[in-house]
Image: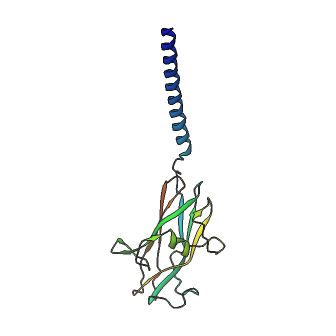
Amino acid sequence: MIITGEIMSLSKRVVTHLLLITGALLLLAGCAGTMKTRFEGKALLVTHSPNPSSIHTSRRFPKPLYPYTWYYKTVVKNTSDRELKVIWFEGYAEHNNQWFGSNILKRTLRNDVFLKWYFDEEGNSTDNEWIRPGESRICDPNWHGGDDPTGYRMKWAYIAIDYFGNDYYSEAIIESVPIK
């Protein structure tokens, strides 16, 4: 009788351990199943047009803030297989072969500003933070300006994330045609 009780107790412990191990394995398999690997390739494609820019007037901004201004359209396209959310972006002006952060707000540009400045492909504002695969967000017009009629190169850079926390970086340079 004592031997039978010990065997029953041992059996319960073995079953308990097997259940714990099985549960742990299922948990690990479940967590691994929800993680999605990083999209390989260029998830964001940034373009400016025309590039170089020779446009110096805009209906949206009839009175430029600077004596010399260049206008262009900036398109940020999701070329990945998942939805992306732009969480940071910045303009950079080139001076003496170095890039310096430069935007009209003089602060870090986050998703809230992106939603105000970038519209869907039909030109409508959107409160949807997520850009679906194949979709674009467009800033038209985008611009930069200064006191020098020869202009300068400007670079716009973006960081987006997917639902899994993977981040993606993209940038594009816009050239200025000197004003004569």
> Seen from this angle, which residue lies furthest front?
1
> Seen from this angle, which residue lies furthest left?
96
Relative side of 56 to 107, left or right? right
Q: Which sits in the foreground, 24 or 150? A: 24
- Tell me which residue sits at (47%, 85%) in the image: 69
- Tell me which residue sits at (49%, 82%) in the image: 70
Where in the figure is residue 74, as x and y percent of width and height? 54, 72
Relative side of 100 to 124, left or right? left
Q: Which sits in the foreground, 97 or 163? A: 163
- Tell me which residue sits at (62%, 60%) in the image: 132
Q: Is residue 19 visible?
A: yes
> Seen from this angle, which residue lies furthest right?
122
Q: What colour scheme does the image use?
A: rainbow
Q: Is residue 157 visible?
A: no
Q: Which sits in the foreground, 151 or 80? A: 80
Q: How many marks?
A: 0
Where in the figure is residue 82, as x and y percent of width and height? 59, 55
- Tell me which residue sits at (61%, 74%) in the image: 125
Q: Which sits in the foreground, 118 or 144? A: 118
Relative side of 21 to 98, left or right? right
Where in the figure is residue 94, as x and y percent of width and height? 38, 74
